[in-house]
Image (cartoon, rainbow, N blue to C red):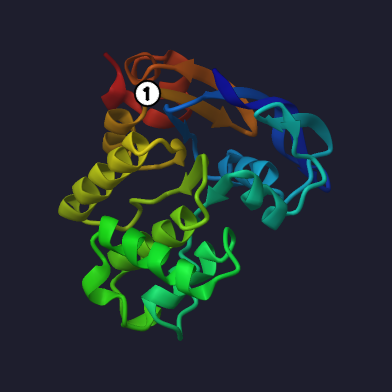
Amino acid sequence: MSILEVRGVSKRFGGLVAVNNVDLDIEKGEILGLIGPNGSGKTTLFNCITGFYRPESGSIRFHGENFLGLTPHGICVKGVARTFQLVKPFSRITALDNVIVGALCRTNSVEEARLEAMTILNFLGLSKKMTLPARDLTIADQKRLELARALATKPRLLLLDEVVAGLNPKETDEALALLRKIQESGVTLFVVEHVMKAIMTLADRIIVLHHGSKIAEGAPSEIATNTKVIEAYLGSEYRA
């Protein structure tokens, strides 16, 4: 069953077409990957889905409800959360307080938000660092913190923008294991990623953008052998 339906979405910046007539569906419970060269429109598409940009044309529906015109906060309340390519913690406050901010999306009780935040930090392996200022965390832990804050809003669909970028192989494996745990908890994932080993092993299905247009869609094995995708992005090492 599709929980998100994107139809004919286009976004322009002056004469530049950043997203061009894109269609996609996300099925409940899956991990959908989104790949493509730098500047291909991946983050712009995320920004359209989450209300940071309003597309010039097309429709975006979540569980049948039209999202166009809703604010990012309004979309978050509906059950769609995101992380950012560059982590954006509240750097001067503690990790715990960062996650409490997200949890207050669902409750007016600070105590309830605190309990929820502590549960999520424990789930993501950050409980021992919850009293540290966010700025004192490593990049890997700041990425987990960003993930924790998004999860605290209790999303049904979570959009992740390059969640393993900048991580070493061990940290990448740990992050992928966490994402699978999140999927198993009932959250659907939509993941932008440049680390091909990560997205090819994580995603159930992958969509490829190039110059703002969708050029391919399919299982990772199909994408890895698609001639258009190899020429536009992957390179000859992915050729079968």
Task: Locate the C terminus by quadrant.
Answer: top left
Would residue 194 be visible to someone looking at this image?
A: yes
Give the residue at x 58% y 44%.
80
Specify whether 97 is left or right of 141: right
Give the residue at x 52% y 40%.
156
Q: Can you give x and y, in whole percent of width and height, for residue 29 in the image?
A: 43, 28
Specify whether 85 is left or right of 47: left
Question: Mark 1: which amino acid?
Answer: Asp
Task: Locate the N terminus by quadrant.
Answer: top right
Q: Can you give x and y, in whole percent of width and height, for residue 222 in the image?
A: 37, 13
Above or below, 146 relative to 109: above
Above or below, 228 relative to 117: above
Above or below, 70 relative to 157: below
Specify whether 146 is left or right of 140: right
Question: Pointer 1: what residue?
Answer: 204
Specify whether 61 is left or right of 36: right
Q: As rendered, which of 123 and 40 lies closer to the eye? A: 123
Total labels drawn: 1
Give the residue at x 46% y 58%.
152
Q: As rendered, which of 227 and 41 lies closer to the eye? A: 41
Judged from this view, the residue extending furthest toward the left is: 170
Query: Image quadrant of residue 30?
Result: top left
Would residue 85 be visible to someone looking at this image?
A: no
Q: How dense is the environment of label 1, judged by Cα within 10 Å: few (below 14), some, or many (20 and up)? A: some
Q: Secondary structure at mark 1?
A: loop
Q: Can you give x and y, in whole percent of width and height, for residue 13 in the image?
A: 78, 48
Give the residue at x 47% y 67%.
112
Q: As rendered, which of 225 and 147 lies closer to the eye? A: 147
